[in-house]
Image (spheres, helix red, strand yellow):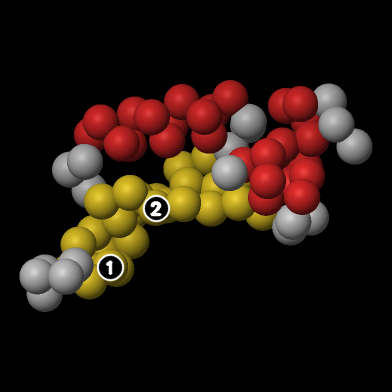
């Protein structure tokens, strides 16, 4: 998805969120965000409603085009 964001869709930034407490997904996201020079932007409180009506806190991560290009040497 990161490559598609910048190479095909020509967007300026990629972002994703993961539910607080979902450590397995969080570790996976952190690994590729770090590889592309991105960052953890913080915890969004009461951000996303679930189908059962619960509202969850979400961690937000982002990678900018500049970070991506620097990490991949593509321009």
**Which sits in the foreground, 28 or 9?**
9
Left or right of 4, for residue 31: left
Q: Residue at x 9, y 70 (%)?
A: 52
Cα separation between marks 2 and 1: 10 Å
User: At which x and y percent is residue 12?
Assistant: 74, 56
Label 1 belongs to which residue?
Answer: 48
2 and 1 marks in contact (CB < 8 Å): yes
Give the secondary structure at mark 1.
strand
Left or right of 29, for residue 75: right
Left or right of 39, for residue 47: left
User: At which x and y percent is residue 46?
Assistant: 23, 68
On screen, 37 above or below 59? above
Disc sitting over residue 12 in the figure: none
Q: Quadrant of residue 66?
A: top right
User: At which x and y percent is residue 6?
Assistant: 74, 47
Local crowd at mark 2 within 10 Å, few (<14), some, or many (≥20)? Answer: many
Label 2 belongs to which residue?
Answer: 17
Q: Who comes first in sequence, dot 2 or dot 1?
A: 2
Quadrant the C terminus occupies: top right
Q: Identify the residue at the far right of this view.
A: 75
Give the secondary structure at mark 2.
strand
On screen, 55 above or below 74? below
């Amino acid at each position: 998805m990161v490559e598609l964001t910048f190479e095909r869709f020509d967007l300026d930034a990629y972002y994703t969120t993961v539910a607080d407490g979902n450590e397995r997904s969080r570790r996976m996201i952190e690994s590729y965000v770090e590889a592309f020079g991105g960052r953890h932007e913080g915890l969004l409180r009461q951000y996303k409603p679930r189908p059962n009506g619960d509202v969850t806190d979400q961690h937000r991560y982002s990678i900018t085009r500049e970070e991506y290009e620097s990490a991949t040497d593509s321009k």
